């Protein structure tokens, strides 16, 4: 039986896990459930945690979850990071450490497969965050590898986006700045006990001066040693301060468009696509005229046909 | 006057530059031009060059272009990499080196802005590659930062995808493998004169053994010192060997779907989206029911309305 909204709202853990899987699989049942639950969402604080591989994002996520639990909060964790121990790409020690969360009813963890269509994963992540919000988790941590624009997009679903950097990245700080400077609400300089931390902070400050952050918003900088739990409390304080009142409406503009496109994908049947791809690859048809014909069929309220 | 297909086919450089800009701006004129030119495409070999920041992708691209020119080929370069000297994110020495290409009529360089919608950039990159193909460039190099899935997608537009790695990445090789192992046709181990090259090659071989490469395809491994031009010829030989006969049809399946979605984006007027985002952010409407109503309007051949 498909989990009902009542069971999710009542905190039924198994119902939540099954609903989460259904959300990941993008089923119509999940959509209907989320439509019903939507009025119960909007209460959770969502933190995006992003940064390059090796920055210690998972360790930070782990420590944030511990700190939040100690404060009496409930925590949902969504990992969209192939290097995350939650997602499976990790060394054994990490995994064992994470397992302590699995026995805690105040923590719900779901890792998202990053194979296949990442566009779909951004949608699934957003829906999953809403599901956890409705289920009563008051803080949601979304961990992504923040180098590609897709992951940046996932991180930007959050109320506040933390960008995690570590000393010794060298030119890579510059390389990744393009997309990241625009979405960072708070820079977390992790492994702050390592050499090069001063240089890293100067570089970030320099980049912040250069970049035209929207509406005078100035991201903060916090140092941490996540592996020792140092600086975690301050990250949370500063993250809560960084919540911007209008960010959610802008995020919904972006999301609604994506939700529509995800649904419109279904309008192109696989067999028609297959035949079309063959005709284009062999240069019998040009793709621009072909796609225009499809758009016209849709405009006339007709299903796409050859 | 908008550049005509005739002028592009005749090798008119200014017409090409203007058409390229129009392609980047996703104009209907560019679509009409590409529809006309499409019959003249399909001749170029397209190489995707991807890998993490700092791997030396731009230097490799530069050296590949030099080598190809020396062989008598013409080269189109598309850079979708914020750290590329072509795109502007580079140190001065790189930029001066690159400028020698700009005076060579056998090389056309276009860097793509990575701000804003990267989805649109994947489309623009694909169209630009077709434009350069039609204009007679027989080899097209597409340079992207290969960590995010979006860039991986751009790289997968190519006939052959080179993944550039360098020694000393440590766990990062594992971190990036998820998306990259599936698209790599050839691993280029750059900076092969540096310590750690043996370890890197072992790691890549190990990952190759673990991964289930589709249809028994086994990506090759080549060592280079791109800054000295070492190994460039072998990269080209191996890249040409790696062209798979059926890859283009699969690529067109993916592209046709994306071309359709890009066109369907226009169906959602900005003002309606704005109002809808407000209603959803304030929880007056739920987004799932709202989007379903839009889909129904499109199904009935009607424009989207509130």
Image: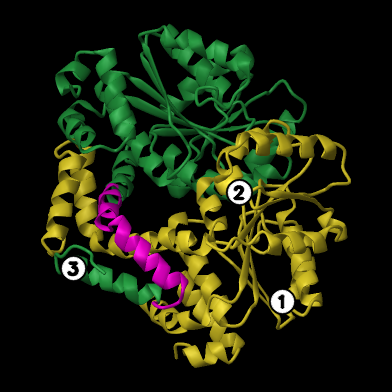
Chain colours: A yellow, B green
Secondary structure at badge 1 equals: helix
Write down the region rendered in magenta: B259-285
Q: In the image, is residue B261 part of the stretch drawn in magenta?
A: yes
Image quadrant where one finds the C terminus of chain B: bottom left
Secondary structure at badge 3 equals: helix
Q: Nearer the viewer, residue A38 or B273?
A: B273
- Picture quadrant where residue B129 is located: top left
Residue at image mark 3: B299
Determine crowd level at label 1: few under 14, some 14-19, many 20+ residues with C-alpha closer than 10 A: few
Q: Chain of mark 3?
A: B
Residue A153: image location, x then y, percent: 51, 53
Determine crowd level at label 2: few under 14, some 14-19, many 20+ residues with C-alpha closer than 10 A: many
> CB under 8 Å between callouts 3 and 1?
no
- Taking the image as drawn, is residue B54 in sight? yes
The residue that appears at 47% across and 59% down in the rendered structure is: A250
Residue B16: image location, x then y, percent: 28, 20
Marks 3 and 1 sit apart, C-alpha to C-alpha, by: 44 Å
The residue that appears at 63% across and 33% down in the rendered structure is: A210
Horizontal side, residue A157 vs residue B123: left or right:
right
Marks 3 and 2 sit apart, C-alpha to C-alpha, by: 37 Å
- Picture quadrant where residue A92 is located: bottom right
Q: Is residue A283 above or below residue B281?
A: above
- Picture quadrant where residue A66 is located: bottom right
Q: Are marks 3 and 2 on the same chain?
A: no
Residue B34: image location, x then y, percent: 21, 32
Q: Nearer the viewer, residue B42 or A34?
A: A34
Q: Chain of mark 2?
A: A
Residue that protrudes farthest toward the front in the picture: A216
Mark linked to residue A102: 1
- Taking the image as drawn, is residue A262 in sight? no
Predominant secondary structure in magenta?
helix
The residue that appears at 76% across and 72% down in the rendered structure is: A68
């Amino acid at each position: 039986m498909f989990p009902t909204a009542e069971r999710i709202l009542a905190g039924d853990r198994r119902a939540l896990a099954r609903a989460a899987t259904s959300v990941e699989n993008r089923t119509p049942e999940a959509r209907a459930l989320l439509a019903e639950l939507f009025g119960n969402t909007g209460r959770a604080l969502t933190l995006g945690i992003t940064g390059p591989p090796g920055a210690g994002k998972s360790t930070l996520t782990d420590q944030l979850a511990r700190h939040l639990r100690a404060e009496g909060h409930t925590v949902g964790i969504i990992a969209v990071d192939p290097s995350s121990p939650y997602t499976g790409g990790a060394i054994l020690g990490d995994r064992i450490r994470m397992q302590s969360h699995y026995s805690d009813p105040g923590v719900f963890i779901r890792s998202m497969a990053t194979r296949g269509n990442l566009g779909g994963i951004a949608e699934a992540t957003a829906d999953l965050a809403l599901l956890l919000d409705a289920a009563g988790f008051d803080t949601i941590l979304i961990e992504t590898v923040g180098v590609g624009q897709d992951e940046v997009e996932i991180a930007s679903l959050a109320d506040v986006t933390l960008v995690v950097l570590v000393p010794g990245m060298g030119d890579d700080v510059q390389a990744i700045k393009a997309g990241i400077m625009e979405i960072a609400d708070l820079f977390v300089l992790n492994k702050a006990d390592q050499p090069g931390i001063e240089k890293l902070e100067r570089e970030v400050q320099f980049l912040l001066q250069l970049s035209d952050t929207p509406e005078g918003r100035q991201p903060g900088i916090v140092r941490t040693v996540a592996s020792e739990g140092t600086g975690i409390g301050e990250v949370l304080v500063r993250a809560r301060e960084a919540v911007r009142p209008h960010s959610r409406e802008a995020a919904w503009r972006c999301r609604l468009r994506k939700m529509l496109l995800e649904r419109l994908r279904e309008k192109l049947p696989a067999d028609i696509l297959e035949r079309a791809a063959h005709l284009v690859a062999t240069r019998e048809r040009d793709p621009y005229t072909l796609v225009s014909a499809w758009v016209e069929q849709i405009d006339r309220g007709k299903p796409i046909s050859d």
